[in-house]
Image: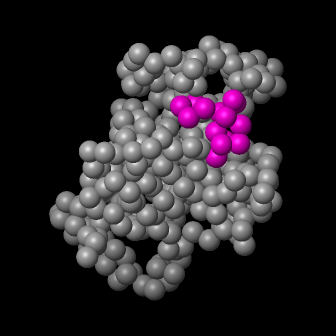
Amino acid sequence: MRPTWSDVTPEAIWLNRRALLRGGLGLGAAAVLAGPAAALSGKASKLSTDATPNTFEEISNYNNYIEFGNDKTTPATNAQRLKTEGWTVAIDGLVDHPGTYSVDQIAPENALEQRIYRLRCVEAWSMVVPWIGVPLGPVLGKAGPQSAAKFVAFESAWRPDEMTATPGLYQFPYREGLRLDEAMNPLTLLATGLYDKPMPKQNGAPIRLIVPWKYGFKSIKSIVRITLTDKQPVGTWQAMQPSEYGFYANVNPAVDHPRWSQATERVIGAGLFAGRKDTLPFNGYGDEVASLYTGQDLAKDY
């Protein structure tokens, strides 16, 4: 019999979480039927930037989410079709405790942190987002990575009845991957909210990946499966245009995209006359992650 998440979560935390849920049930059926919590809060993190976050309106109305549209504005409308109730994530592959877990089991409220991160899109725009979530490393640690595991593969939901993308134009379900040491880095986050709200659907509800030193397309949305493997995963964009979108996708102002410069970026919300700002290596997180790539040629490993 496969263990449940409670078997790999400290008992005191698990019991406390269950007690909170029982208390919530006592408040009345209406609160239960209302669905996800109306507000989220997370402990402040020393890993947050002190940059001023973009507004909630900017963050939730300027989105790349190709399952719901090819421009920046239609996902905010089309993604409302996505049904997120009862969402589960399978964690499998080279782990000692494979299983299927709810979002609440993976990211319980008492473990949430607020991480204010810079976001740099491969399209050379940027914003600052106050995510709420849990570090990915401890989640994988509970699953028990086996010694042969070297990479982590992620898979998004693909629901043609709820999503508006044209089949055949892209390769769905959307996939991404990290090396295991990248996934275990303290910066890597599984986010379930932003500001004090559950994750908006157009931003990747109910649970998504955040890897702040890589271009935004690596931060896969609406995750349904996390697989530890000994083989390097191939991401969706990498599969479609390998000369333009590499496996690593680290923010690197010295390595241009084949069709545009990556030296500077347009800051969302800065105004028409603000100009562009210089892009920083690893999106400004070099002190935390540059050592992961010691000895690698980052022009080759783009």
Q: Is residue 95 visible?
A: yes
Along the horizontal axis of the image, is 57 left or right of 7? Answer: right
Specify whether residue 241 is painted magenta.
yes
Residue 277 lies in what quarter of the image?
Answer: top right
**Residue 119 placement (x, y as % from top left):** 58, 34
**Residue 196 placement (x, y as % from top left):** 51, 52
- In the depicted view, which residue is nearer to us: 279 or 112? 279
Q: Is residue 59 visible?
A: no
**Residue 37 placement (x, y as % from top left):** 48, 66
Main SS of the magenta part reads loop
Residue 135 lies in what quarter of the image?
Answer: top left
Q: Quadrant of the N terminus?
A: bottom left
Q: Please tell me which residue is depicted at 71% across the width and 42% down the height of the picture.
A: 240
User: Which colour assignment does the render follow?
Assistant: one colour
Q: Quadrant of the C terminus?
A: top right
Along the horizontal axis of the image, is 175 left or right of 23? Answer: right
51 vs 152: above or below = above
**Residue 227 placement (x, y as % from top left):** 43, 54
Q: Please tell me which residue is depicted at 51% across the width and 61% down the height of the picture.
A: 224
185 vs 275: above or below = below
Along the horizontal axis of the image, is 302 left or right of 293? Answer: right
Which stretch appears magenta? 236-249
180 vs 288: above or below = below
256 vs 23: above or below = above
Q: Please tell me which residue is depicted at 46% across the width and 18% down the height of the picture.
A: 296
Specify whether residue 89 is painted magenta.
no
Q: Please tell me which residue is depicted at 40% across the width and 68% down the height of the picture.
A: 100
- In the depicted view, which residue is nearer to us: 221 or 119? 221
- In the depicted view, which residue is nearer to us: 219 or 15? 219
Residue 204 lies in what quarter of the image?
Answer: bottom right
